[in-house]
Amino acid sequence: MPVEVSDCILCAEQASEFRPFERVRGWNYVRCSDCGLVFLNPRPTDAELEHFYNHGYRYDLSRYARSLPSQEIWLDLLEERCGRPGTLLEVGCSYGHFLAEARDRGWSVQGVELSESAVGFGRAVLGLSIEQGRISDLKERDSSTFDAIAAWHVLEHDPLPRHFLETAFDLLRPGGILALRVPNLGSLVAKLSGPDWQWLSPPEHVCMYTRETLSLLLEQTGFEIVATRTARGNARNMWFEILRARAKRQLTHSNNGGGDHGNSYSFASPKVYQDRAWYRVAENLIAAGTLPFDWAVKRWLAVRGEEAELAVLAQKPASQEPLRTTPGKGLERATI
């Protein structure tokens, strides 16, 4: 059964300071009134999440492969920050297409992924070195090994993000780069879509971040923020997403796939319509109709940090001695 969270993951504030945020598919998102972090409470256990990713969660292989060209910008940024291709670990590498592209550009690559089927594809079809498991499974063996670690839409899935980031810190060489992309809860589309925003999706999305909360968590775990930006990324057309979410709320009077009435803690994935012809036609029509306005607004949203996807590059300091904190306290030196 899901477990109650008694202290805020980010600032250690007590549960009495948690405020209701949204209820989605039987799950409760709460917001810490002190630091503003939004997370599931109760949250799924590690065993429940592992079972979910191997039996209930599916991400279409063809759609994943089609998204790769738009993601190469992130590899460009990594190469710019690292100076040259080096050793790269991708956490939550899925089927491995991003790693394969990095390998073709001269990186020495390794992946770690929970899904057994995705690991099998990456190994057999793409010839990649991918380990089934979590980032913590690499810690003892590969300490201070990597020039860069990429985690694309992974951190929001982790119920213990502090432990994830501390492990990533230890796996990086001094001066190494951690690259993260997460849904941006501070985006305009998230605010206007409400509980039916596409990325407010339990049980897989446990913690939801803004630029402020993610930056604070990274600083608490010893990282120095190098760059932050927001982009449309993997998100749907913003105007289509807002219309879809609001129409769904009006028509069904329920959140994100139903299940909010008498169906607590649903582990069933929401229905996915993206690859249905009528869905693509509707989205393409709205995208075409809003194109001139969208072009102008995208630039404005990016400047304000309010696009749907938040990307952060953080660096492990050149010194081996991390600057870490206890949640809720000031920065202080700590040894690894």
Image (cartoon, helix red, strand yellow):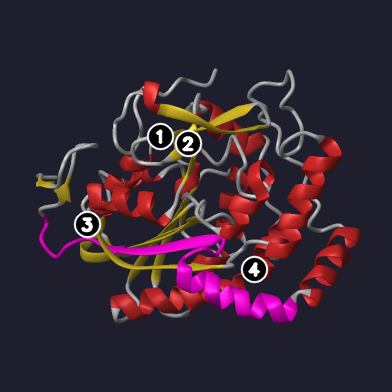
Sequence order check, earlier mark of 2 and 3:
2
Residue 206, horizontal then vertical, whole percent? 51, 38
From what the image shows, is residue 95 above or below residue 21? below
Q: Residues within 10 Å of mark 1 (few under 14, many from 20)?
A: many
- Calculate the distance from the C-alpha at mark 2 to the C-alpha at mark 4: 27 Å
Can you see residue 221?
Answer: no
- Calculate the distance from the C-alpha at mark 4 to the C-alpha at mark 1: 34 Å
What residue is rendered at 60% in x and 44% in y? 200
Of the residues shown, which amino acid type is indicated by label 3? Answer: Ser
User: Do the numbered discs 1 and 2 sit on residues whose CB atoms are within 8 Å?
Assistant: yes
Residue farthest to the right? 278
For label 3, the SS is loop
Sequence order check, earlier mark of 4 and 1:
1
- Calculate the distance from the C-alpha at mark 2 to the C-alpha at mark 3: 30 Å
Sequence order check, earlier mark of 1 and 2:
1
> What residue is pinned by disc 3?
144
Q: Nearer the viewer, mark 2 or mark 3?
A: 2
- Calculate the distance from the C-alpha at mark 1 to the C-alpha at mark 2: 8 Å
Magenta range: 291-320
User: Can you tell which mark lies on residue 32?
Assistant: 1
Of the residues shown, which amino acid type is indicated by label 4? Answer: Ser
Q: Does the magenta portion include 23?
A: no
Of the residues shown, which amino acid type is indicated by label 2? Answer: Phe
Can you see residue 307?
Answer: yes
Residue placed most toward the observer, 175 or 43: 43
> What residue is pinned by disc 4?
67
Sequence order check, earlier mark of 2 and 4:
2
> What residue is pinned by disc 2?
39
Q: Count of labels shown?
A: 4
